[in-house]
Image (spheres, rainbow, N blue to C red):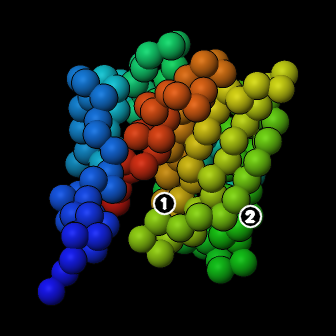
Amino acid sequence: MMGPVCWSLTLPLLLGAAQEELPAGWVKHAPANGRYSAMMPTKPTETKKKITTATAQLDAVVAVAEGRLESYFVVSYTDYPLKELKADSIDKRLDQGAKAAAENARGKIRSEKPIKLDGHPGREVVIEKDGEVIAKMRLYLVERRLYQVMVLGSATIFAAKEKDVGVFLDSFRLNK
């Protein structure tokens, strides 16, 4: 029989309290071809871009939602040709994604650590400019698709008391 201490430790997990409550007005974004879902502060605008690399022409799909405190919440994905994704190139792709994001934000990588999502390799990256955090992102390589889940903004949105960044990054899920 479970005692009161045991119930107090397990009840929040049973009730799903491990996931933070969503801020008011947030919407679920789950594009049909994206094979993902994420909670965003507003309905995002989705665009497609052509990216030319040394070895291929790639299509990127980018969803951007405006948030509070002059912030932007972004999910993008790009499919790579199978021939470019050898086992030894996974880290290289993730490194390139992090480096390109820092360059596009005109900042530099402050920290980077390996992560996983449903067993798929990834990176969590913090980008700074002039000593202040301007972006937090997670990259995941899922088969031949590179996902970039990112928040861009001023240091205010990344302050410890602000929860929007964590809620967004933690809400990203792969569709089964």
11 or 107: nearer the viewer: 11
Residue 8 picture location, percent across and down: 26, 64
Taking the view exactly as shown, the residue that stands out farthest to the bottom is: 1
What x and y, as percent, mark residue 51?
Answer: 60, 40
* Residue carrying label 1: 145
Tell me: 161 left or right of 88. left
Q: Is residue 116 above or below residue 158?
A: below
User: In this image, 113 relative to 175: left or right?
Assistant: right
Circle 2 is placed at which residue position? 92
Total labels: the figure holds 2
Q: Nearer the viewer, residue 168 or 34?
A: 168
**Residue located 41% across and 39% down the image:** 168
Q: Secondary structure at mark 2?
A: helix
Image quadrant for the C terminus? bottom left
Q: Residue furthest front?
A: 4
Q: Residue at x 72, y 78 (%)?
A: 88
Disc 1 is placed on an element classified as strand
Gap between marks 1 and 2 measured at Cα: 14 Å
Three-letter amino acid code of the residue under disc 2 = Lys
- Disc assigned to residue 3: none
Marks 1 and 2 close (CB-CB < 8 Å): no
Q: In the current view of this chain or complex, which residue is farthest to the top? A: 70
Q: Position of residue 2 (x, y in %)?
A: 19, 81
Mark 1 or mark 2: whose residue is earlier in sequence: 2
Q: Is residue 91 visible?
A: yes
**Left or right side of 69 for 30:** left
Query: If the image is split into quadrants, where does the N terminus sit?
Result: bottom left
Picture coordinates of residue 146, whole percent (x, y): 53, 56
Residue 49 appears in the picture as rendered: no
